[in-house]
Image (cartoon, helix red, strand yellow):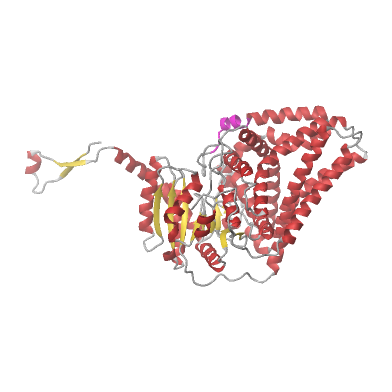
Amino acid sequence: MPKQDLSRAPDARRVAAEGMGLRRLILIAGALAIAAVVAVVLFQVLSRGGVSLMEWTTIGLSTVLSAWVGYGFMSASAGFVATLASRAAAAAVSLDGPITSRTAILLPTYNEDPGLILAAAQAIGEDLRQMGLAALYDVFILSDTRDEQVARAEVAGLLRLRLRLDGGPQAYYRRRAANSDRKAGNIGDWVETYGGGYDFMLVLDADSLMSGETIAALTRTMEQEPGLGLAQTVPTIINAETPFARLQQFASRLYGPMFARGQAWWSGSEGNYWGHNAMIRVRAFAESAGLPHLSGPKPFGGHIMSHDFIEAALLRRRGWAVRTLPELGGSYEETPPTLLDTALRDRRWCQGNLQHGRVLAAAGLHWVSRLHLVCGILAYLAPALWLALVVCGAIIWPGQHVSLRSAEFAEVVGLFVFTLALLVAPKTMALLLAMVSRRTRSSFGGAWQLLLGFVIESIASILTTPVMMVMQSVAVAEVLAGRDSGWSVQRREGSELTGRDAWRAHRGHVVLGVGGAIGALLVSKYFLIWASPIFLSLALSALLSLHTSRQKVGSFLRRRGLFQIPEDENPPPVLERSLALRRAYADEAPIRRQIEAMFREPTPVYQPATSRAWVSQAATPRLQPVMTW
């Protein structure tokens, strides 16, 4: 698996033309047209008496952000139309037939709860065995764990997993002596050591799960398309317990499939990779995706943190197709339980995505691969740009003297409504897709439950997005200042926040929200109204973070069927089995602690009693335990 030279384009196999040119033209032209409308209208409003530097900055920021919003709107609209067309079209191509390839199922782990990974591995293995496919798949638990106690639990669990999967799939464990290059290095080490024995590898995450049927469909897809290097599924979020996680789960399940279908519609063979729940052709990955280290110090130098986008781009650079398969279900993942856990994960992703700026100019990349990288960068730069736009608006607004009945005021209001409609339209389209299908409505708990969930999720999004925007902006500033994020363990099922924790994390946001609202009122009551969602979100951030972390509230919402998703009402067998195994593992925790304690002490010794009176009373000596602990 050679390290790739980013300065030289390699020889590449030819990828068949798919007629994506018109689709991509529609996407880009639509986004640019939306940006142009915003730029022209804003220029007309601000150009009275000349345009100052700050006003030019406002126009520039608004244009860039409008293009970003327009891109999302156009891609979502494509997903809406494509979904309607797929429902009206004939059934998809059959993926039945024998499987002849060998596939490795990889579960990388770093100081994670072993019960989480072992339950998924066993549930997946049993699902494949029931389908008669166990002999074609092997499971590899690839550990980068540094905690010795967790590592011992991994090994003990692996031995038990082998006994439980007697008859296949085979289960293997490897723990690296040094966890160089993090997850990418972990996968790369496996490819160089064991990859030659397999045609494909299914890369999962510590909280991933996938049904045997989906795994088989992915394998057949790879077999039927020899030029396919990577097939990415669209995971469904599951097992959400806190209100925050249930909101994320509901939104992902309702909106996610349409967004993914839209991206697949215009990406074609130049798709993207999200780092897990994807099947990869091992030979293609080995020859294409060896990641070099970037020159210079961290956070922009060193190993590439957000490796998945780059690996997809390098696969396509070598001539391998990378596709997203939104129509394929049975793929699952989990989400952080609280807003603060999400912010911690985003901090790491922010650094990795900004680092992609060093790879944008790599030789031989397809322009759509570069577009994916730009979008990943903008995903974290955009919040900072929005905040900058608010600041610019506060500075230039007092000098505009826009009266309530003036033409400029109508244009400003129209521009605000236009932007708001672009932001709301994608979610509304996804809701319409769910409402027009009786089966889908029912799986979300019925029309009224679905509508209520949609309304509450929209309000919650308005309240939480600004504080997330501020935290992401701080993360961008930290990265630009040279601060490295490190490699922290992702909390999957953390404890609830305390009031002290929430206040400590959000006190700066609360002060900023209250102070900003007072300052905005001093500027103009209209400016305060325009920016009120931001100030309200910041002022309430501690309360929002605290109460959306409550598992009791999450359990109440589940019992009432609010934010229900299809997997809640009708969980697939692999999910039910995984949850049962996780509960059993958790119930065994006291026994495991006793065993751990026993191994830390000398081994118990049993000695026979030697009392003469005792011997005279019994023909057969009884053993009395003399324990050394």
Q: Residue at x 54, y 71 (%)?
A: 96
Asked if residue 124 shows in the view, the reply is: yes
- State which quarter of the image contains the C terminus: top left
Classified by dominant secondary structure, the portion drawn in magenta counts as helix
Of residues 44 and 415, the one drawn nearer to the viewer in this rendering? 44
Rendering quarter of residue 327: bottom right
- Which residue appears at 59% of the width and 29% of the height? 504
Residue 259 in percent (x, y) is at 67, 55
**In the picture shown, does residue 456 fall above or below 392?**
below
Closest to the observer, 76 or 456: 76
Q: Position of residue 491 (x, y in %)?
A: 52, 42
Residue 240 in sight in this render: no
Residue 460: within the magenta? no
Left or right: residue 56 versus residue 629 is right
Residue stretch rendered in magenta on the structure: 496-506
- In which image quadrant can residue 330 be found? bottom right
User: Where is residue 515 shown, x and y percent of the image?
Assistant: 72, 27
